[in-house]
Image (tube, rainbow, N blue to C red):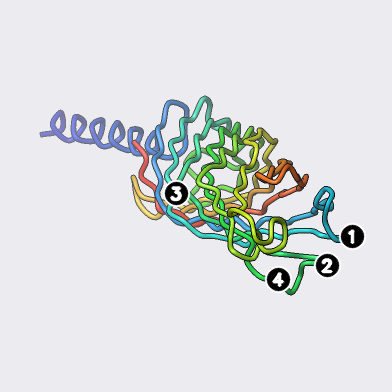
Amino acid sequence: MTHGIKTLAIAALALCGSTAALAQSAGTWMVKTGVNQIAPQVKSDDLSASSLPNSKIDVKSDTQAIFTLGYMLTDNVSLEFFAGLPYKHEVVGDGALSGVGKLGTIKQVSPTLFAQYRFLEANSPFRPFVGAGLTYAHFYGEEGSGALTALTNPGGPPTSMSADSAFGPSFQLGASYRFDEHWFIDGSVIKTYLKTTTKLSTGQSIDTKLDPISTNLSIGYRF
């Protein structure tokens, strides 16, 4: 009987050890899904000639589902790949064009790879973290509006536009909370520094710093 109790005790300790390993310890994989809002913090140059002085643009926010995959390299250092469904942003007039309204729409995907440092012990339920990474913003599906054509090519064919895809550094501040062996919730704020050039079929172009702030909340599973 005593031997059986000792065997059970050793098994329980081993189970506890494996449970701890299911926290954020070295070798742990983490998958998450949730929602993310991208809010561009736009600083626009002027639209090139011929256009009114101070002809600028702004880009509206959008919210979509996200998916991430993470791996703990050590108890404190992790890698995370961050991606999501395509975002669709409205492009509107600003500056001298602020009363024009929608000039067009643009779609984008912006996968990001982060290196992260997670504070506190691996088995702590609550773990804040910081991250730094590289974002690739791929723009596509650009569509100009009737207002854009009226401004840039009145009486002519519809004005089309295209935006250059670009890389930019991203910085992350977040935290996760584990509420059982496998499941956790996770949230972060990401600042990305990104600049693009949008070209019109009229030969005009505009340089824009997008520099978005992303805010996300996810539920995750670790194994």
Asked which quadrant contains residue 118, the reply is: top right
Q: Residue at x 50, y 40 (%)?
A: 82
Asked which quadrant contains residue 92, the reply is: bottom right
- Mark sitting earlier along the chain (3/4): 3
The N terminus appears in which quarter of the rendering? top left
Tags 3 and 2 touching, CB below 8 Å = no
Give me the disc on residue 100: 4
Which residue position is annotated with label 3? 66
- Give the label, 3 or 1, closer to the camera: 1
Q: Secondary structure at mark 1?
A: loop
**Label 1 is placed on what type of residue?**
Pro
Tags 3 and 1 touching, CB below 8 Å = no
Label 3 crowd bin: few (<14), some (14–19), many (20+), radius 10 Å: many
Q: Residue at x 69, y 48 (%)?
A: 191
- Give the label, 3 or 2, closer to the camera: 2
Asked which quadrant contains residue 119, the reply is: top right
**Label 4 is placed on what type of residue?**
Val
Label 4 crowd bin: few (<14), some (14–19), many (20+), radius 10 Å: few
Give me the disc on residue 53: 1
**Label 2 is placed on what type of residue?**
Ala
Q: Nearer the viewer, residue 140 or 109?
A: 140
- Mark sitting earlier along the chain (1/4): 1
Q: Position of residue 216 (x, y in %)?
A: 53, 55
Alpha carbon distance from label 3 to label 2: 36 Å
